[in-house]
Amino acid sequence: MTLLAVTVAAVPVALGGCTFGGREEARPAPPELTVTPTDQAKDVPISAEVGTTVKGGTVTSVRITDDTGAEVKGEPREDGSTWVPSVPLKPERTYTAEVTATGDSGKTTTTRKSTFTTMPKSTKPAITSTLYFADERTYGTAMPVTVAFDPPIPEEARATVQRRLFVQTDPPQPGVWSWVSDGRQVYYRAPDFWKPGTTISFRAGLEGLPIGKEYVGDADRRATSKIGRQVALEIDNETKQMSVFRDGKLLREIPVSLGKPSTPTSSGKMVIMEKHEYTTFDTRGSADPYVVDVEDAQRLTWQGEFLHSAPWSEGVQGYTNVSHGCTNLSAAAADWLMGVTEVGDLVTVKGTEVTLGEGNGWTAWNVSWDEYVKGSALPVPAGLAPSKAAPNPGTVAGGSPAPESSESGGSPAPDPSVSGG
């Protein structure tokens, strides 16, 4: 349903003024205030926000109560355009919003009340959202807040969804949301890596949100976690060496074996997505079927590229590429690395035969900032806008978040305790 806002000018309490020495001073006009949902509106989505528009003043108070008189907590958006309930409203309930605006002079106020009723519980299918940002974790400085969707979000509905994805950072480090081209993932990051010690609080307020004509959002989720020290891995195919840095200082050089020519490792900027002390790579059904148990495995892509222990290739590590696309390490090096890295650390691979596919993993760092912000479905704040206008804003990445294979086939699904949501 479409909610129409009606502006009603407040009637001044007194139209006259005081007279001093024969001169009359007019009382300042009260502000004009518009509130949505409009009074007596029905079938309002449970994701509704209280919208306010003011002429000649600013909103100074918003209070919303349900039909039992209980107050609904919430907070304003940064731009002050709406007041967002902290939890979804209840279906088929009546709510009253009372909003007060104070005039620019500070001497007049206008108060509006709007009573509205929410719609019944939706019977439309829900789009499943998966949050890859868990609560009470420590992540690396390249960790993008990532939300995946099934089915994907159509392009025309992405702005609606994006407006219900909230991020706060302490200390403040503003960022931008960016969609993959197929609508299956959306990332949030800042222009630079997160500062160590930053706290990130996230809310996906999607429960009951109308998404296009056919779907609704599935859930309201929150998570708060911290950013740890900065660790970065750089892998050079020419030298067959991995350089491990912590806070900018080189910790160790490790010989590696990358993907053989028929199954090359991807070059690009990746993020460690999950870590397993033990797991099984099962590629049965592929052109090169095998089943192998591995230790100390760290996922880099959805299609199954990992850093992992490979004692069977220790003799050629540093010299020859023999893997199915993964980065092979010695058992001792892989065990050591597991104690150094966190989910969210950046891994850069260069010099291989193929480049990282867009959306194959958390590819938010595999493009420049100017390219990244083109993927926002909403206007980018002035301080974060690209350095020059782009002709075709809208997408920066593609691909599916569904894990497919390990070393080109059959990896286990991501561990929910790592991936979040």
Image (cartoon, grey):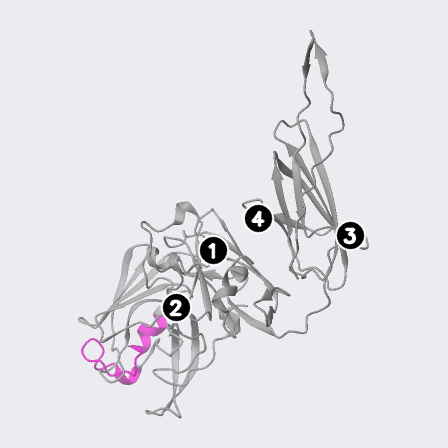
Q: Residue 77 has which mark?
A: 4
Residue 259: percent from left, percent from top: 26, 80
Q: Secondary structure at mark 4?
A: loop
Looking at the picture, which amino acid does disc 3 mark? Ala
Residue 359: percent from left, percent from top: 39, 70
Looking at the picture, which amino acid does disc 1 mark? Leu
Q: Secondary structure at mark 2?
A: loop
Distance from disc 3 to disc 2, alpha carbons, whole Å, reads: 45 Å
In this view, the mark in front (2 or 4): 4
**Which residue carries the number 3 mark?**
70
Q: Residue 378 has which mark?
A: 1
Q: Secondary structure at mark 1?
A: loop
Distance from disc 2 to disc 4, alpha carbons, whole Å, reads: 32 Å
Q: How crowded is the residue under tag 2: few (<14 C-alpha within 10 Å), some, or many (20+)?
A: many
Q: Is residue 121 visible?
A: yes
Q: Secondary structure at mark 3?
A: loop
Task: Say which residue appears at 62% left-offset and 26% top-offset.
Answer: 105
Label 2 vs 4, first from the N-terminus: 4
Q: Is residue 41 left or right of residue 382?
A: right
Q: Are marks 2 and 4 in contact (CB under 8 Å)?
A: no
Q: Residue furthest right?
A: 68
Looking at the picture, which amino acid does disc 4 mark? Arg
In this view, the mark in front (3 or 2): 3
Distance from disc 3 to disc 4, alpha carbons, whole Å, reads: 22 Å
Distance from disc 1 to disc 4, alpha carbons, whole Å, reads: 15 Å
In this view, the mark in front (2 or 1): 1
Q: How crowded is the residue under tag 4: few (<14 C-alpha within 10 Å), some, or many (20+)?
A: few
Q: Quadrant of residue 299?
A: bottom left
